[in-house]
Amino acid sequence: MTIRYGISLLALVLGGQGVRSQELHSIPGTFDTFTTDELGNVYAISGDVLTLYDTQGHEVARNSVKTMGRITQMDAFYSLKPMLFSAEQGQLAVLDNTLSVQTVLNLARSGFQQVSLACMSVQNAFWFFNDREMELVRVDAQLRPLANTGRLDQLLGFAVRPTGMQEHDNRLYVNVPSEGILVFDLFGTYDRTIPLKEVSSFEVRGGSIHHLVAGMHRTYDRRSFDIHNVDIEGTLTTLRDVRVERGRTYVLLDDRIAVLQR
C-alpha cells in the first residue's frame, strides 16, 4: 500500500494530468477565513464580522463575533448551523441560520484545558484536540466525553501537531502537515495515515480529499490514490483556502472569494 501511494505522488510531481476550472462569480472583500456548507452557502469572517452568503453570492445575514475574540476555526458540518471556535478564549459557539448565537460553551470550565482544535460531529457532538494531553476527545452537546484516542505521541511514535480536522462519513480526518492526514473512527480508534504532507488546508467530499499545498489546489482520490492538480484559469494565483460543494469550487483570494465551475 505504501508503495502505491509513493508512485501516485511521484506521478503528480512529474506532471500529473490537471483539471481546469472557470470562475462563475465572486464575493468581493478582504476575508480572514471562510467555510461552506453542503448546500453551497458561504460563511466568511472579516475582522470581527461574520457574514453568510447564499449560493449566488448574495448576503443573507451578518453578525459581530467580537466577544469571542479571534476565531481560529469555523465548521458548517450542519448546514445553516455553523460552529465557531476560539482557542485563545477556550470558547465554542453554535449559531443559527441568522448567525445568532444559540449555544456558548466554555471549555476550560468543563475541564478541557489547552484545546487547540475543534470540529463538529454527528449527533450534535464535537471533537477536540487537547494539546496538554496530546489526544483527541469526542464529547456530546453537554461536553460529556464519549470517546478518546489516548496519547497520540505514544500511539503513533511522533509528536502530533495538527492544524485542522474534519469529520466525514463517521471518520475523523486530522491534518498533521509533517506526517499526513490521520484517520480515526468515531470511537477514537486510529485507522491509517494518508500520506498528503505539507497540506495547509483540506476538505473531504465524497471520494476525494481537496487540499492546498504551497498554494496549489489538488485532489486526492481515496479509492485509486491518484492525485491531480486543479488548474484555475485567469489570474487566480494567490490561493489561501479552497472548498468544494456540489460541483463548485470556492477559493479564498486576497480580494475576494471566487466561485468556480469545474
Image (tube, helix red, strand yellow):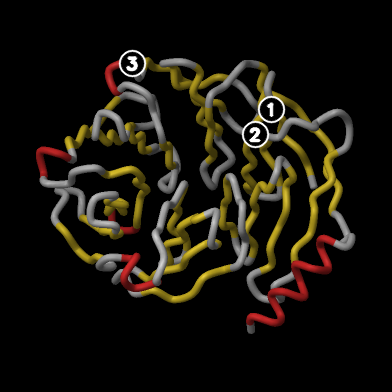
Closer mark to the observer between disc 2 and disc 3:
2
The spot of residue 140 in percent (x, y) is 20, 54
- Label 2 neighbourhood size at 10 Å, few (<14), some (14-19), many (20+)? some
Q: Amino acid at mark 2?
A: Arg
Marks 1 and 2 sit apart, C-alpha to C-alpha, by 6 Å
The spot of residue 17 in percent (x, y) is 88, 60
Choose between 210 and 51: the one closer to the eye. Answer: 210
Q: Is residue 114 above or below residue 88?
A: below
Mark number for residue 253? 1
Helix, strand or loop at label 3? It is helix
Mark number for residue 240? 2
Is 111 displayed left or right of 98 in the figure? Answer: left
- Label 3 neighbourhood size at 10 Å, few (<14), some (14-19), many (20+)? few
Helix, strand or loop at label 2? It is loop
The quarter in which the N terminus is drawn is: bottom right
Q: Earlier in the sequence, mark 2 or mark 3?
A: 3
Is 53 displayed left or right of 189 in the figure? Answer: right
Q: Amino acid at mark 3?
A: Lys
Q: Residue at x 27, y 17 (%)?
A: 67
The spot of residue 123 in percent (x, y) is 29, 58
Q: Residue at x 64, y 41 (%)?
A: 242
Mark number for residue 95? none
Q: Residue at x 42, y 62 (%)?
A: 172
Q: Are marks 1 and 2 in contact (CB under 8 Å)?
A: yes
- Label 1 neighbourhood size at 10 Å, few (<14), some (14-19), many (20+)? many
Helix, strand or loop at label 1? It is loop
The spot of residue 130 in percent (x, y) is 27, 51
Is 216 displayed left or right of 121 in the figure? Answer: right
Mark number for residue 66? 3
Choose between 117 and 18: the one closer to the eye. Answer: 117
Marks 3 and 1 sit apart, C-alpha to C-alpha, by 23 Å
